[in-house]
Image (spheres, coloured by chain):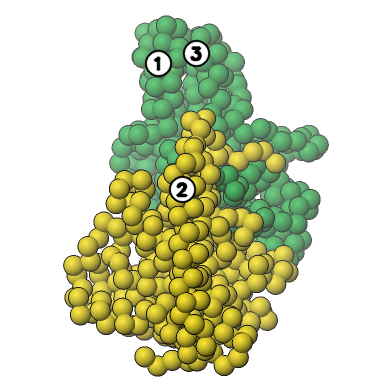
Chain colours: A yellow, B green
Amino acid sequence: MVSSIPKDSQSVSELQEFYRQMVLIRKFEEAAAKAYSVGKIGGFLHLYIGQEAVGVGSIAALTPHDYIVSTYRDHGHALARGLHPNPLMAELFGKATGISKGNGGSMHFFDKNAHFMGGHGIVGGHISLAAGIAFASKYKKEDSVTICFFGEGAANIGSFHEGLNLAAIWKLPVVFICENNHYAMGTPEYRALAVKDVSVRAYAYDMARDHIEGDEVRKVRDHVKVAVDRARRGEGPTLIEVSTYRFRGHSMSDPAKYRTKEELDAYKKKDPLMRARHELELGGIKPEVLDKLEIEIQTQIDEAYAFAESSPEPPLSQLHKYVYAEDK
Amino acid sequence: MAVLTYREALNRAMVEEMEKDPMIYLMGEEVGHYQGAYKVSQGMLDKFGEERVIDTPISENGFAGIGVGSAMVGLRPIIEFMTWNFSLVAIDQIINSAAKMNYMSGGQFPMPIVFRGAGGAGGRLGAQHSQAFESWYAHCPGLKVVCPATPKDAYGLLKSSIRDNNPTIFIESEVLYGSKGEVPEQEYTIPLGLGEIKRKGTDITIVTWSRALSFAEEAAIILEKEGISVEIVDLRSLRPLDENLIYESVKKTNRAIVVEEGWPVAGFGAQISHLIQKNVFSYLDHPVERVTQMDVPMSYAANLERMSLPNANRVADTIREMLR
């Protein structure tokens, strides 16, 4: 493992914070997987395990005024944004205390106050929504930047092309982050992408591009920051491809038999959490400190689980609420 | 009272609303420099500039999504589809994003957006440009669906649609753009969900909206000479629906016929027919009938197009049968 050792106390504490967030995501999702397997969570459950460094690194490059648009694999992005695990877990359980009051579920986390603009379930459809949010920032002359996550599978749908083209011609403050985990559900990238490197498609839109490995959280942050700053300066969008890997199947219902154990094991050796922990130890953090941190996070997740479990279901009167907004 | 065309009334509504609220913008293909494919946005670029009257490339899915995203953060977009036929490539954004956003976020994201443009059949435009899609959109909860038939209604309903905090499907009739009508000088709005009795009568109720109102009115004039008194209910919006107006009329006339420009199968007339038989069955002297477009794609041939569309004679014939 090639390691970048944090050089000073500031970068150590920064990495430690990133590590905390990544562990939080992993433990949250391990708990969610457990709840799913015993029927406490319904629907689809797409886990982010293995990809944590992408969300944590990218979102660390933002200010609270910036916006995040996510996919159906949105738990990691929401936690990285700092949303509390309780209402997120409660949403998975379909409870009234959920972040979307139980109307959204796993794929539709929303938090307006945190500028977390939703998990979206239609592949690629949210790419132009992100451009629209960025359009609004420009329209209102605010300096917010929007980042939009999607998988390499979304790069093949028309919304990707239209969203990127519009963002480019209007120089919208948006950063498109393709989390390439190499499988669109069960279809490997070589069967879906005529050109495997998604980021080179930026050339088609005269857009800035970047391509990074997604196992090193601070590196992701640094690269995304460059793109975010560019967008904030009014110099337009960037397409970043981050190579990553999901350790689980597409969703909980997918045993992922389309890939080999050898391949999975090779990627698990590049586990971003292991890497960050190793770097922290090289930076002088004692293993006991990190063990303690993990235990604290586990406690927090256990609390979220208990909160979700003990929360009430939405009132039946909610069925018809929210179909239409209140009048102006 | 001023006499305006349908397109001028729409233009006036947009201009007045945009003058009041800087968060409103107009976006679509050719809305700016070209002055609107159907000239509905004539003069608006000069008035509001390129920041608020925004030409797009041909990418309905993309700019519909831009509209939805911008509405999530406080803008109030008016998205023009050159025609509703082209909205089908944006239907994902309309139904999967706009219609659901408030619901699936637990009320966090109202969606103050208007999708508007030309619908229905024009003069021999063929199968891909001659379609009335209001039934498609009315099918979907979360959307409001508005179909004005007169310049006066077009103005008042568009203003209400722009002010509404929900996604509104505003379907203008392509053949009505040049039609003229009196429009009050004074500003006014027409609440969504409020139909209007366009003609009073006692023998039968025609329920209709948009361009089909003209077929109904023509049929009423023909039948009047035969001593048949027709009442015409113009729904003006399908969602929300003025159900009581329909029921009150049917209670009086005891017969109802729906006249619409769309196809018959799973069309909105089927819903109205169901509602009438469900709610005022005991008042009916005859099953509810429908006059629709024929159940075929539109032909280019002039005679076949004529035959395909509903018309006054078909309406009158059906009513005569119902009263026999």
Amino acid type at image mark 3? Val
Front residue (pair A94, B150): A94
Within-10-Å neighbours for mark 2: few <14, some 14–19, many 20+: some
- Look at discs 1 and 2 and give the one toward the viewer: 2
SS at badge 1: helix
Q: Quadrant for residue A48, please give it.
A: bottom left
* Viewport quadrant of the N terminus of chain A: bottom left
Contact? badges 3 and 1 (CB < 8 Å): no
Residue for point 61% across, 73% down: A62
What number is the disc on residue B250?
Answer: 3
Within-10-Å neighbours for mark 1: few <14, some 14–19, many 20+: some
**For the residues tagged 3 and 1, is the chain the same?**
yes
Q: Please say if A214 is above or below A163.
A: below
Amino acid type at image mark 2? Ala
Amino acid type at image mark 1? Gln
Looking at the image, residue B272 sits to the left or right of residue B304; the answer is right
Q: CA distance from mark 3 to mark 1?
A: 10 Å
Q: Position of residue A257 (x, y in %)?
A: 18, 67
